[in-house]
Amino acid sequence: MNKLFLIIKREYLSRVRKKSFIIMTLLTPLFMIGVFVVPILLASSSEDKTTIAIIDNNKFNEFRLTSSHNLEYTYINELSLEQHKTTLIETYDFLLHIPEIDSIQQIESSIEVYSTNQMSLSIKQNVENQIDKKLTNIYLLQSGINPDQIKKSQSKSRIKTYVVDEQGENTKGNSEASFGIGLVGGFLIYIFIFMYGTMVMRSVIEEKTNRIVEIIISSVKPFELMLGKIISVALVGLSQFAMWIILGFVFLFIANGFISTDIDVMNLNANEAVLSSEIGSSLMALPIKSLIFVFLIYFLGGYLLYGSLFAAIGSASDQETDSQQFIVPITIPLIVSFVLVQVVIDNPHGSLAYWLSMIPFTSPIIMIARIPFGVALHELLLSISLLIGGFLLTTWLAAKIYRVGILMYGKKISYKELWKWLKYKD
Amino acid sequence: MNILEIKHVIKEYENKKALDSISLNVNEGRIFGLLGPNGAGKTTLIRIINQITAPDKGEILFSGERFKRGHIQNIGYLPEERGLYKSMKVGEQCLYLAQLKGLSKNEAKQKIHHWFKKLDMLDWLNKKVEELSKGMAQKVQFVSTVLHQPKLIILDEPFTGFDPINSEIIKNEIIALKESGSTIILSTHRMESVEELCDDIALINSGQCILEGSVNEIKNNFKEHIFELRFEGTIQNEIQHFETLVIESGYGIFKAKNKENTHTLIKQVVEQVNVTSFNEKLPTINDVFIQSVNNE
């Protein structure tokens, strides 16, 4: 026990003292924010305007496209398409041509677009939507209906969701917030298992290539060394979480000061304001403490399950490049569960979601994605028990491979070889 | 008294017997040479003694007791393939290894100071291993093997990587360790080190011990009754019961045809010449090694 403590202490200190650890701890939150915020910013930025030149040969003047925030239409007075086609597609992103037609209905199927590059699906849909809106309005007017009346009579319902517990207590729910938290939680578990798992693997390979491992295991059992390593990396992870949570609160505290003074100037329309305040209030209503607690359990369980496998892979490799062939199969369940998070969030109580959150290899990511939508306690306990069983099994298997692998040098290890190691006696 | 008794130990890997019912004894307070060609089973045996692997069958006694986990605190092991944590400081690393061998922090610090002072390495303590030369790192490894004053020290090729000066320092330390009561198992292919250091040897081949005993005893058993003479004058008459292997002016080598008549050589020679030196040519351990392994 004392030796295990010594190993954990050395492994832990050797990691947290590194400059790279401190830099990573500070940069990871920025990176995470980047992953979620940058695409949103990029998508909403108005810089990316698509320019479209229009040569309009139709005589129905009521059909005229108007520029929007990301589409800029320019009507060209020259009416000959063939003459101007090549010069126009050099200046504009696209050239839209409306040929001469006999009835306005023909517009639907006669518009042509020319460009040097294939038009993207989203821009195509965007333009088509605009055309359809215009035409619908024209058709409505032709039928004697005022489009404004239609607009007014369109309803915009917002369902308020409540989650009812066994005692009949209601908690205000919010599908959007649950969706967001489920997605982010699943993503974080996925990243962390990879990050800390490879940390364990690198450390095993380092001890092997350094040739210190034989000295160490003449004092401690290989299992103690492996366990010490896995536990210390888990502690490194938990320390990092703790620092991130503190950094998060500091950030919130500072941000709060700015936002509270600026909030009234923000130009939100009525609906957006209601939605964002609802998300805000239901974020507050979510049991943050128990979410963090469950997150930690699944992070630890998932990490221990995969971490021991990463240790086994490290032991069977002389250098990091050797490890690739073994990494692929163990990352498949991780990647599959990450991809399926979207499906699970769409139907968090379906049978796919249920089974994936029971299988220990997928449950850490899937269960975290389901938690914000509410999971029955007995399901949660069953899943956690299976996860514990799962990591005990993988640790046992990994230990068998590890004790043989760390003393094998200069041999390309096959799966057949690993299978033999499993059967070796001590 | 035997510090280590190995009795009929068997270790198999995939139907290949790495150790095939091997038995040998290591005497306390001696330097024991563990010899054998590559792949003979030395490393497997050493790993079993260090409890890195367990034997499939057989019995091991340590100081007369059944071998148990606690005994590894009394063993120091310097493996052939050895290294240190590169980014760790030398002092911290030795402290860690000593604590893993059961020393308290204070005890370990004292011993580290003692050894580093003795070998003139004190100013290395705060250096990182990656800043040391290969020879320096080897010295640190040697020190960390013996820091906890183990009763049994196992050194696998301890001299590789050392220059002649450092080799000499390590050699003297090994002798000093023996004198202070430790037993040393020395596994090496450098036969001159065996000749110089070892009291006893065991020769292992194909997982079995094919030769065991004190160096002198073994040399005696392998001697071929060959005598080397230096003299003044000329030997003219044939020497009875002896075969002349070399004869030059003032020098000759003679081999007895049977061991009963060896004493007659000097008698026959002094009648003819003035003998200045006379000695029996004993086989080297290298000769014994090659002869034994080839005879197998």
Image (spheres, coloured by chain):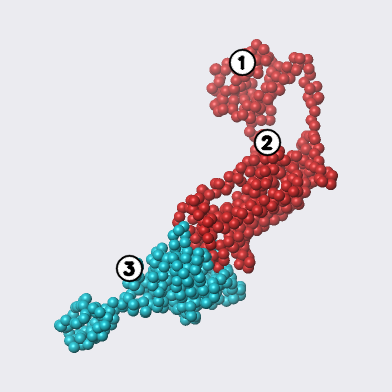
Chain colours: A red, B cyan
Residue under circle 2? A44
Amino acid residing under circle 3: Asn
Callout 3 secondary element: helix
Mark 2 surroundings: few (<14), some (14-19) or many (≥20) residues within 10 A: few
Res A218 visible: yes
Q: Are marks 1 and 2 on the same chain?
A: yes
Callout 1 secondary element: loop
The label number, if any, that marks residue A99 in the structure image:
1
Asked whether A9 or A370 is in front, the reply is A370
Amino acid residing under circle 1: Pro
Q: Is residue B230 above or below residue A282?
A: below
Horizontally, residue B272 falls left or right of residue B157, namely left
Q: Is residue A18 above or below residue A358?
A: below
Residue B214, x across and y down, in percent: 40, 78
The label nearer to you, 1 versus 3, is 3
Q: CA distance from mark 3 to mark 2?
A: 85 Å
Residue drawn at x 68%, y 36% is: A44
Residue A342, x across and y down, in percent: 67, 39
Asked whether A354 or B66 is in front, the reply is B66
Mark closest to the chain's N terminus, 1 or 2: 2
Callout 2 secondary element: helix
Q: Are marks 1 and 3 on the same chain?
A: no
Residue drawn at x 57%, y 48% is: A330
Residue under circle 3? B295
